[in-house]
Image (cartoon, rainbow, N blue to C red):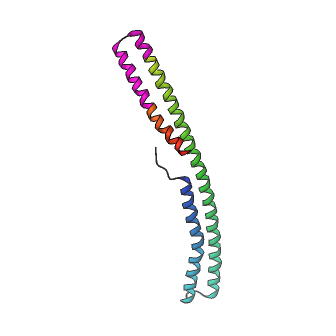
Amino acid sequence: MIALIDPTVLHDIVALTNTILLWLTPLLLAWVVRIQIKNGKLTREEADAAKIAAIEVAKKVQEVVTVAADSAKENKEQGEKILSQGHDIHTLVNSQTGIMLTTIYEQSIRLYKLTGDPVDGQKVDAAKKKLSEHEEKQHVVDVRESEKK
């Protein structure tokens, strides 16, 4: 199975990054404006205009943070849905594989009883081996699933 980042962890990383950006952006802009005033590169009017611009940037950052948080939440929900569906499909395929292998084993026994041919006897052994291997693998999955609960 492909290793994926846990949607909850991804959501937390995005939320933390957005919070840092939200806090840091206006602070950095204010700091740059203050340095430029101190160095005489900005007049008081220009500084006031820069402060207003910094406030607008902070609002836009807040919008981005909100959209990113909403997207992260939607992605988390979608990821959980996909993982759940994948698990359900895997369970169904395993179940159907078990039914198919059981049917093949039973039919190979019937054929061997009818023919008595040693080749058919070998097919019974091969079918039994495949069914046993599947059941062993399924048991490992079942144990792992029960431990998760």
Q: Is residue 147 magenta?
A: no
Q: Is residue 8 left or right of residue 55?
A: left
Q: For the point 56% across and 60% down, which residue is it?
A: 12
Q: Is residue 100 above or below residue 148?
A: above
Q: For the point 39% across and 10% down, which residue is it?
A: 115
Q: For the point 38% across and 23% down, which residue is it?
A: 126
Q: Is residue 77 above or below residue 88?
A: below
Point out the residue furthest to the left here. 118
Magenta segment boundaries in residue numbering: 109-134
Front residue (pair 75, 142)? 142
**Which is the main secondary structure of the residues drawn in magenta?**
helix
Front residue (pair 113, 147)? 147
Residue 55, image x, y percentages: 65, 75
Residue 43, image x, y percentages: 61, 88
Front residue (pair 43, 104)? 104
Residue 135, image x, y percentages: 46, 31
Q: Is residue 85 above or below residue 61?
A: above
* Location of residue 63 by image quarter: bottom right
Figure label count: 0
Residue 106, image x, y percentages: 46, 19
Q: Is residue 120 left or right of residue 39?
A: left
Q: For the point 56% across and 64% down, which residue is it?
A: 16
Quarter of the figure with the C terminus = top right
Q: Is residue 123 magenta?
A: yes
